[in-house]
Amino acid sequence: MKTSLVSFFSVLLSIPSSAQTSLKIALKKADPLDTATTLTIKEKIRGHQAYLDNAIATKNTTQHFYGLLYLYVDHYKAHDYVGVAKDLLQADSLAKANHNSSWLGGVSMRKGLMSDVIDGKLEDAIAHYKEAIKHCNVAKDSLCIGESLEQISTSYAFLEQYDSAHYYFKLALPCLQKFADKAQMALTYNNYSNLLSFEQKYSEAKIWLDSAIAITKANKNLYKEMMYQNNLASLYTQMRQYDKAAVLYHQNLIINKQNNWADRLQHNYLGLSVLYEVQGDYHKAFDYLKIFYLQKDSLTGAEVQLKIAEINTKYDIQEKELALSSTQLNLVQANASVQKRNIAITSILLFVFMGSIWGWSLFTKKKRKLLHHQENLSILTQLLLQKNSQLTSMELQLDQAIAKEKPLESAVANEDPLENSFSETSLYNQRILTQADWNNFKTHFEKAYPGYLSRLRSAYSTLSEAEERLFLLIKLNLKNAEIADMLGISADSVKKTRTRLRKRLELAPDDQTDDFIRRF
């Protein structure tokens, strides 16, 4: 695979620049707003919305697509992640309808950024970036390919797969050096600095990071500079230059507050928490950690995640319905009714169960409440595990029904790509543990083990959300296969997360991960 990629990029880089396309450059040229002006983000949203409305009114498909991507950026900077999801889904539908490889590549790359930054799903992000490379190769957009490769490298770095991270960075660098502008190169240098920092190569990391900061200062891009300055403060912490780190963090806080850059502030607070923790000032460390979680929940909390999930589901259903014949559509609707009935029954059972728990608790002593909450948590966990089995059974019934309705010969003759996509990916194939499920689960967990989550986050503040989920599920004595079913991921993904979790917990070689977690 790696050999074929090297050969592919050797051919790609030999293509003359005049034969290249670039969605990024086209977007910049067509932008109706002068990026050098001091427009507020609200003003940019109004301007780009007017551009989009005019494109729709005049049926200008290109401007329609561009307008959606302009608003995608605006809504991201305004921390309106629900708006970001809507813009991206509409752009995706438009790109598919026009069979435009350049647009499909641009959307796939932005999907990767959404999976990475908003959802924290690095493996999903990598899959989107690789999909972007396929489309951008067809479009001969080397800049898009270079950016996607570089983002793959960054994702592997955060997954601690350093060999893969270096490999993809080496593929990306010549592409970016030939086609990227200075701002993109600054981001590339910053991300590679992060990789070197993860490997504890701090002196090398600082050289690359200093280059990124110098470029952003020359470009007078303060927003990007704040990201790189925060990374420099983090690097000072790792190098044990604590005074420099503290001064830089607090300087960044002032600038980010003045500009209301909530996403930058979030990283400042987490960095300060880590800084004071390594210095032994746990009171300050905990204070900043609390601020970080409040900030994080306000930007990408459960409500935002739930709204994004609902939007994705609606668009997914809409896309699939367009690909179905009238007979298939009726079948889907029938199965949807079955699914709704099953969900309703499950909800009623859960509601009745919760009601009985509540009624019973009125007549029991206080010392019995904790036991009931633990029983409640156990049953809820089993319901979530059963949800996977129900969805899998329904998906099989749907596939069998479609197979009977449409003979194989007809399918081969038509070769409708949207119908093929439907047969490969069921309409009801979705994450087993949704954000709403997880919020409900955490609520019952807190009742069963009061103060446990706060104690866990205080003791191990650097745990990712995925690692925290795994910790709680192991606490409940779930096996790897059950955890994989509940989260809707592969067993290998569970094993990788367990490995990262063990490193975070800093266990001794003879300590068993499960035993440690159950004793915690």
Image (spheres, rainbow, N blue to C red):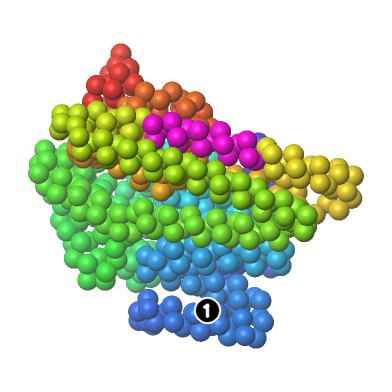
Which quarter of the rendered picture does the C terminus lie within? top left
Count the numbered circles shown. 1
The x, y position of residue 247, in whole percent, is 15, 56
Where disc 1 sits, the SS reads loop
At a point 50% along the width and 73% down the height, the residue shown is: 70
At a point 37% along the width and 38% down the height, the residue shown is: 353
Q: Nearer the viewer, residue 42 or 159?
A: 42
Whether 265 is drawn above or below 358: the answer is: below
Amino acid, disc 1: Asp
Dot 1 corresponds to which residue?
Answer: 31
Quadrant of residue 326 within the rendered picture: bottom right
At a point 34% along the width and 21% down the height, the residue shown is: 514
**From which residue to which does the magenta span run?**
379-395
Q: Nearer the viewer, residue 192 or 89?
A: 89
Describe residue 36's horizontal placement relative to residue 489 as left or right. Answer: left
At a point 32% along the width and 17% down the height, the residue shown is: 512
Examine the rendering and report whether any part of residue 496 can be seen. no
Whether 58 is drawn above or below 144: the answer is: below
Which quarter of the rendered picture does the N terminus lie within? top right
User: How packed is label 1: few (under 14 Cα within 10 Å), some, or many (20 or more)?
Assistant: some
Q: Name the main secondary structure of what is drawn in magenta.
A: helix
Describe residue 401's horizontal placement relative to residue 519 as left or right. Answer: right
93 falls in the magenta region: no
The x, y position of residue 191, in whole percent, is 41, 50
Quadrant of residue 266 within the rendered picture: bottom left
The x, y position of residue 253, in whole percent, is 20, 61
| Residue farthest to the top, as pictured | 510
Examine the rendering and report whether any part of residue 296 can be seen. yes
Q: Nearer the viewer, residue 215 or 275?
A: 275
Describe residue 513's horizontal placement relative to residue 120 as left or right. Answer: left
The x, y position of residue 347, in whole percent, is 45, 44
